[in-house]
Every structure is written in C-alpha cells, then in structure tokens.
C-alpha cells in the first residue's frame, strides 16, 4: 500500500486537494483528510457500486482493487491512494456486457438482495487472477473476506469455480482484468 | 377448473425451471441503484443525535453550537424536552448539512442534557423487578399433572435464544425531497405501497401527495416495514431546508443498535411420553424480551398438539431497541424450545428422535403425510438411519460427531397484490406493480408468470416495481409476495390473452373462441392461418392493451401451509468447545415452484442465516452501560463462506405439491437450523447446550455440567 502522500501544510482540519487514478481516469476532489477512499468514490466521483456496509473493514462490500490487489475501500483514506491505480466494479462490464466473473455470478444465482455483490465480484476477480484454477477449499479461504447476509455462499462457490473455467477457456489471462502491476 | 389455473405439468415451458433472476446483471455490475446510491442535485446529508442512555428523560436541548457549524442547514427535534426515552440509541435530534462530514460535526455539536432513569437491558431471567415484567395468564389444557404421573418417561431441560439483529447490509434510510406541496422519497423498505400511508398520517399531508420509490432494496428480513422515526426526520429536514433533498441513512452502529431486534425466548420445559414415544404431557415456563413491547409468547408447544399442557409466559419489558419482526417471527424460538425438549425426551427413552417425531405425526394440525415423506427424503440425504447412534455414542475422542433433526411449518399465504399488464402494439410487454424485490426474486417471478402465460421468453417481459404510484400491493411479509404476485400476474396475463385474441380475431376472419396462443404465435385452433406475436399485437391498432390483475381473485392459484424437515451433521471439539457444521439437509415443501433457482436460493439463504444464529449471532447488552456491546460487524458475527459446510436443499415436487398452487418459501427454512444443530451437538457430546448461539464458552460450560 502506498504511504501517505499528504504534503506538509495540506493536512487537516479543512479540505485538501486529492487526485486519484480510478478506472484509468484521474479523479479530483477537495476532501477532508478523514474521507475514506470508499466515500470519495461514492459521494464525490459517482461510483456507487462499492457499498458502505460495515464501514470498518470487515464485510468486503466495498472491495476495490488497488494496483490489482483486493482492499476494503472503507479502510483506506482517499489521500493515501494518490499515485495508486484503483479499479472498481464499474470498469468490469464493457459497454453493458458483463465480464465472465459477473456472468458466472448471474448464472449461479450468487446474489439475492445484491448489496454485497459488487464486493464479491471484485474480490473474485482478483482472487482468480492469483488462483486461476482454484480448488473448492481455496475458494472458501480466498473468498472469506466478503460477507453476505442473504446467504448466497453456495452460489458464490459455484460462480467462482465456473468463472475460473470460463476465464481459462477464453484463454484470456485474468491478470489483465485485475488492473496490472503491483 | 378455471381459465386462470396453472397449466398442467406437461404444458409448462418455464414454470418450475431454473431461471436466472432478471435483475442479477444490474446487481452484479453496480448499475442497480439502491436508496444508499441515490444522488440528487443539492442533496443534503443528515445525521441523528441519539440518546446514550437506556432509559432517560430529555431535560434540555441546545442547538446553538450545531447551527454554527459551517455547512449546517437544518435541525429537527425528534423527541423534545420532557420526553421519556426507552432505549439507548433512540432518535433525539436530526440535523442536515451540506456534506456528510459537516452533518457529523453538527450532530456532535448538539448538546442534550438527560435525566437518567433506572434501566434493564438483560433478559437472562424472568425474575426481574415488577416494572420490567408482564406475566401472562397461565394456560391449562387437559390434566398435565395426571399425565406426567402416568408417563413412562419425563425429560426436563432449559432452552433459549438471545436477541439477535437483522443486520441488513443496506442500512435503513431514505432520501426525502419536498416539492411545493408534495413529498417524494426513496426508501429502503419492504412496503413501498404502505410507507406513504404512514408518512401521510405522521406528517399530516394528503397521501396522494406522497410518492415512494424503492427499486432496489438491500434486504429487510422483516425489519423494514415502517417509515420509522428516521424516515420522518428526513422528510421534516427537507421541508425545513426549503425542499432540498435530504439523505438520512443509518450508519452500521445505528443499524445494529436500533433497527433490528428479534425477540429472545428462554424456557424451562418438562415433557412426558409413553414408552413407545407417544407424547402425553407438556409444561413450560418461558420468558423473553422484545424491548418496550415485550416479546410475544412463541407458539408453544410448537407443531405438536400435546393433549395435556401447562404453560406460563412472561414478557420481559426492558430497555433495548423495540422488536421488529424477523424472518418467521417467533417460530425459530418455539421450534428450539419444543423440538429440543422432544430430542432430550427421545434420548431419555433411548429412542431415535426421528422415530419419536414419526410416532407423533398424528398430533400435528396438518400435513402429517408431507412430514412423513420429508423425513424419509431427509433420512436418505443424510444417511441418518445408517449413521445415527444414541446420544454421546456416535464417536469417541476429542472431536465428536453428532446428528440432529428438526421440523417446522409456515403459512406462506399469498397476500393482496395488484398489477397492470400492458401489451403495446409493437409487441412489447410490461408488468407494473407497487411491490418490492428484497432479493427474494419478485421481479423474476412476475416475468416468468407473464412469459409462461403469453407464450413469450422471460426476457421479453419488462417488469417495473418499487414505486408507490404503481398498482397497490401489500408489504412483503409472511412470504406472501410470491403467491400474491404470481396469482395476480397470472390473472392479468390470462385476461390479456383473451382480449388480444378478441381484438385480433377480425384480422384472421374467425371468432376469438377459435383462436389460441401457442409457441409465440396466434393461430386458428386445429390449423389454419397464424400470426406471429408481433403481427398479432400490431392488429391492436393505436391503443395498447392494458389489464389489471388482482389477488385474491378467481381460480385456485395459491395455497398456504408448508412443512419442512432438516437434519444437521456436526462435530464438536470437546477441548475447545468449537462446533463445526459439516452438512445441513433441508427438505422443503413449497407447493408449485415458479422459479426453481431463486426458490432454492431462498432456502440456502435461510439455512445460512440459521447457521448464523445457531453458532455466532447475539446482540450483547451490557447492564452497566445499558448499551449494545457489539453494534458492528466484527463482533456481531455473520456466517462467512467457510462456516457453512455442505448445504443440501431438496424441494418437494410432484402432482400432490403442484396442485396446491404457489406457497411462500422465504421464511420456513430459517426455523429449523437452530434446533437441528443444537440437537446434533447434544447427540455429539451427550449433553444439551441450553442456549444458542452454541459458542465455545457455552459448549464447555455444558460439558462441565453447569446449568444455565
């Protein structure tokens, strides 16, 4: 994770200019230093796919990728990810067409109310980039950072497994999806 | 036989198959906009000052410092000076500001003085001061004393479940915006058509001036039926701010502390039987709390009408957030108290608990044949008959195996529902209803029924819900939405077909009675000219065809009353007290299945929620502080993907189930997990762990012979 890049004299109280690379676009805002990456995405940059649920880095509904790695966006300050590459769920479906992970979640009914779903999808995307051919036990361990209250875990297990097969069949390295270098 | 009746098994194209939920792509891509995601121009953010005491009177409120916070826009006193507050976290003052940070600062700047009053927040005993106790009249059936005296075996035990919270991932909340005389609100609710009435009464504005939107709802489980104090606060703040939209959504702490509470139940039970397992006598002393309103008496004894009974229930009226109905209200509690006791009785008799349940199926008020069949199916799926051994003898060593069984019932009766089905001259079909989809699959059910009836693919049906301007439908509760929506859409679609054929008939030069809808076309029965769906619709002329469908109505499309059986396979580490669930089998009856995929998901979801309250979930209240100690998701622990073991769902199907029509299935399967798992743990370790959740400390205490 990037270290704090707040310059002396800019730290709060009061708003500071913040600039973050999200889905390939540089986004800017004047933010209180205490504003999390999640709130910056949702309240300032209109990216509401990541949800605020526990707000304490427990449930994973706000999962985004920072330089390709899964993180809880509620547990990071926006000022601390300046210079990093952020990937959110909004970048996964191209022109409205779902990507293989999203397709697999739909087919396996790995969602009910859907409030945790974007977090699961992003988490699964990064998990599959690191584990292209996971065993069921690896999926249970690798996806344990996301919680679902509706109880869709059987579907999630099936979806991640199916997505792994679809991604390898498409011969498209999942790493491309995960946002590149670390 | 009515024209509305469901098509017979051989003629169904879509009904009962696996159909992916139609709103899943929107949810998997982040395009689905929930109340939390609503962003309106000039929107203000609200926060609420909450009482830090479990019982207090408001002495003084000073808003002056809050009003000086940069960005402050409005304040609304929810409960003013002199008001008695009955639980910690209850709303006192709501403030709105330009952004969330400013709202938080303004909230903190509000100064409230309280007169602190005596409180009770625990419920571990019914022996509480009279002010907190509402004993209900004892109830007597037959001659319990005589029956116990004659019984061959009598078991006595303690059983209980603490208060748990709904923990909706989308916290309760709304965005309110006043027009000149009208109010428009986005609300995370399970009653899109019911909230306007509540708002109209509380705000004293005509109901016709209120419109509520809830296209996507991040779950509810029974907790989102009311407009709630915070919904009214949002409306008041918007009015004060000159109509600016105000967003008031609870944070996680608020959600856990005040927006969800399933009442607790504890009981001391004595139950007696003859040597062959026939139940003869029941005696229970029970108590529980649902906060200020107490906790209603759970239906004891559950399912089995034991001929001789003595029951006494006490409502503990304490200072926790007030009760909210939660998925199959009172049933998981009654189920554990009763079927836990029957399991202990079977152990005392040296009987297989499945045999004891079978022996007493005659005491059920309905569906004994269904339970008998389900017990057989569950037995096969769990290999119960081959594997089960008497309590404490399943395995030796430090990690011990155990099997447990439970059964449950649920009405699931179709609720009132109205929809408009419209066929446009260009062939497009839409169905609109003032209902909501909580993740249950309402949209998908509506699309399936319309598609099945109109001979179209599911994707051809546009479903619009979550708007109080649409035809009025009931709140989603009691698993009534699936039966209500399926029946109403079926009637609308059947009527629409009749009208379409009548309006198309002249073009084909035959009477409408000679036409039929088949394979996506309108054709003359027995051969002859036909029109594609689009061609037929083009004959409507300029006017679309619109039909209102209602439930209740003609035809036998829905029923009520389902039974289910569950079996659990656990292991318990007797050194650490850790319980591991290996497998949970759910055999569930739900009448005619509309969508096998989402119905199965509902049962899976119920099992996962059931495992959560069996092993992990408890709203911990501290009597000294008067507050909840775990209002967050790290210490209020939900199941994760690694905690659930193997889940096996079997939906009963076949002519005897199908012919009953659609019955709700969102709740029944959440009733039994606590009991099946508790019974499996008792089977594994040889003693009953009286109270859920079955945490290591409770398991170790039971192993050491402690009593609750």
Image (cartoon, rainbow, N blue to C red):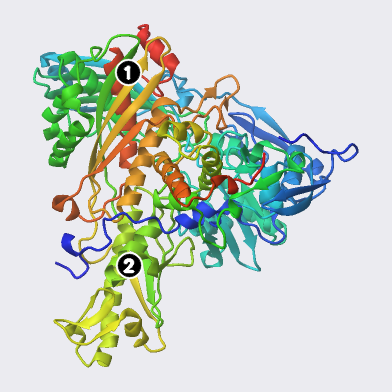
Tell which subunit mark 2 falls on.
B
Q: Is residue B697 left or right of residue A13?
A: left
Q: Residue furthest left?
A: B276
Q: Is residue A78 visible?
A: yes
Disc 1 element: strand
Q: Quadrant of the C terminus of chain B?
A: top left
* Dot label at residue B19: none
Figure quadrant of residue B59: top right
Q: Is residue B137 left or right of residue A165?
A: left
Per the image, the residue denoted by label 2 is B450
User: Which residue is rendered at x = 11% and y = 34% of the image?
Assistant: B362
The percent coordinates of residue B227 (x first, y second) are 52, 51
In the rendered structure, which disc, 2 or 1, sits on the residue that comes first in sequence?
A: 1
Closer to the camera in the image, B358 or B303: B358
Q: Nearer the viewer, mark 2 or mark 1?
A: 2
The percent coordinates of residue B190 (x first, y second) are 45, 52
């Amino acid at each position: 994770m990037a270290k704090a890049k707040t310059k002396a004299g800019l730290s709060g109280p009061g708003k500071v200019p913040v600039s973050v690379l999200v889905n390939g676009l540089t986004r800017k805002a004047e933010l209180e230093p205490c504003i999390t990456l999640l709130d910056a995405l949702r309240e300032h940059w209109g990216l509401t796919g990541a949800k605020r649920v526990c707000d304490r880095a427990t449930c994973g509904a706000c999962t985004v990728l920072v330089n390709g790695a899964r993180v809880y966006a509620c547990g990071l300050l926006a000022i601390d990810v300046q210079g990093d590459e952020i990937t959110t769920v909004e970048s996964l479906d191209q022109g409205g067409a779902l990507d293989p992970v999203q397709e697999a979640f739909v087919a396996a009914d790995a969602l009910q109310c859907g409030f945790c779903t974007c977090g699961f999808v992003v988490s699964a995307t990064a998990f599959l980039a690191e584990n292209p051919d996971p065993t069921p036990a690896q999926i249970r361990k690798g996806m344990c950072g996301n919680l679902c209250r509706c109880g869709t875990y059987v579907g999630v297990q099936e979806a991640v497994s199916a997505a792994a097969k679809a991604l390898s069949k498409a011969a498209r390295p999942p790493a491309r999806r995960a946002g590149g270098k670390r | 036989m009515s024209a509305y009746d469901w098509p017979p098994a051989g003629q169904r194209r879509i009904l009962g198959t696996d159909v992916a939920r139609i709103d899943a792509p929107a949810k998997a891509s982040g395009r689905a906009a929930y109340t939390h995601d609503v962003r309106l121009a000039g929107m203000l953010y609200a926060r609420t000052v909450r009482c830090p005491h479990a019982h207090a009177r408001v002495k003084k409120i000073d808003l002056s410092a809050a009003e000086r916070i940069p960005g402050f826009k409005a304040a609304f006193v929810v409960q003013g000076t002199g008001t008695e507050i009955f639980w910690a976290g209850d709303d006192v003052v709501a403030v709105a500001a330009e952004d969330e940070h400013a709202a938080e600062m303004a909230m903190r700047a509000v100064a409230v003085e309280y007169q602190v009053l005596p409180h009770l927040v625990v419920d571990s005993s019914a022996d509480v001061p009279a002010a907190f106790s509402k004993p209900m009249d004892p109830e007597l059936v037959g001659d319990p004393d005589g029956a116990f005296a004659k019984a061959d075996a009598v078991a006595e035990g303690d059983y209980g479940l603490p208060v748990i919270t709904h923990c909706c991932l989308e916290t309760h909340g709304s965005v309110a915006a006043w027009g000149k005389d009208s109010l428009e609100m986005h609300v995370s609710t399970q009653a899109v058509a019911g909230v306007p009435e509540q708002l109209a009464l509380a705000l004293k504005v005509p109901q016709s001036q209120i419109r509520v939107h809830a296209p996507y709802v991040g779950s509810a489980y029974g907790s989102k039926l009311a407009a709630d104090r915070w919904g009214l606060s949002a409306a008041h703040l918007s009015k004060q701010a000159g109509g600016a939209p105000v967003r008031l959504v609870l944070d996680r702490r608020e959600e856990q502390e005040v927006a969800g509470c399933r009442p607790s139940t504890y009981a001391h039970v004595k139950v007696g039987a003859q040597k062959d397992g026939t139940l003869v006598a029941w005696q229970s002393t029970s108590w529980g709390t649902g906060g200020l309103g107490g906790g209603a008496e759970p239906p004891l004894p559950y399912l089995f009408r034991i001929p001789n009974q003595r029951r006494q229930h006490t409502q503990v009226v304490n200072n926790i957030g007030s009760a909210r109905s939660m998925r199959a209200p009172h049933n998981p509690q009654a189920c554990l108290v009763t079927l836990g006791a029957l399991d202990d009785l079977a152990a005392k008799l040296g009987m297989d608990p499945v045999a004891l349940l079978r022996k007493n199926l005659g005491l059920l008020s309905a569906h004994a044949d269904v339970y008998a069949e389900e017990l057989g199916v569950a037995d096969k799926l769990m290999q119960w008959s081959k594997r089960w051994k008497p309590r404490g003898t399943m395995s030796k060593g430090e990690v011990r195996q155990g099997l447990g069984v439970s059964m449950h019932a649920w009405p699931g009766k179709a609720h009132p529902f109205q929809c408009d089905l419209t066929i446009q001259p260009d062939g497009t079909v839409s169905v609109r209803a003032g209902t909501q989809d909580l993740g249950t699959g309402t949209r998908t059910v509506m699309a399936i029924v319309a598609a099945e009836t109109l001979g179209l693919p599911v994707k051809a049906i546009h479903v619009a819900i979550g708007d109080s301007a649409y035809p009025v439908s009931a709140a989603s509760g009691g698993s009534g939405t699936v039966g209500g929506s399926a029946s109403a859409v079926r009637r609308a679609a059947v009527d629409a077909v009749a009208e379409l054929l009548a309006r198309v008939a002249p073009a084909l030069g035959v009477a409408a009675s000679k036409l039929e809808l088949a394979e996506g076309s309108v054709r003359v029965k027995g051969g002859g000219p036909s029109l594609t769906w689009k061609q037929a619709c083009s004959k409507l002329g300029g006017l679309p065809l619109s039909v209102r469908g209602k439930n209740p109505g003609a035809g036998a499309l829905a029923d009520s009353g389902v039974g289910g059986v569950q079996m659990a396979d656990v292991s318990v580490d007797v050194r650490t007290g850790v319980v591991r669930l290996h497998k949970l089998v759910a055999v569930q009856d739900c009448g005619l299945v509309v969508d096998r995929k989402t119905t199965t998901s509902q049962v899976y979801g119920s099992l996962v929620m059931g495992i959560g309250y069996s092993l992990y979930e408890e709203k911990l209240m501290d009597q000294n502080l008067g507050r909840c100690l775990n209002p967050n998701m790290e210490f209020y622990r939900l199941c994760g993907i690694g905690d659930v073991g193997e889940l096996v769902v079997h939906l009963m199907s076949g002519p005897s189930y199908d012919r009953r029509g659609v019955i709700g299935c969102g709740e029944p399967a959440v009733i039994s997990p606590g009991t099946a798992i508790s019974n499996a743990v008792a089977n594994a370790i040889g003693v009953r762990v009286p109270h859920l959740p079955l945490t290591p400390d409770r398991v170790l205490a039971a192993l050491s012979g402690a009593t609750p």
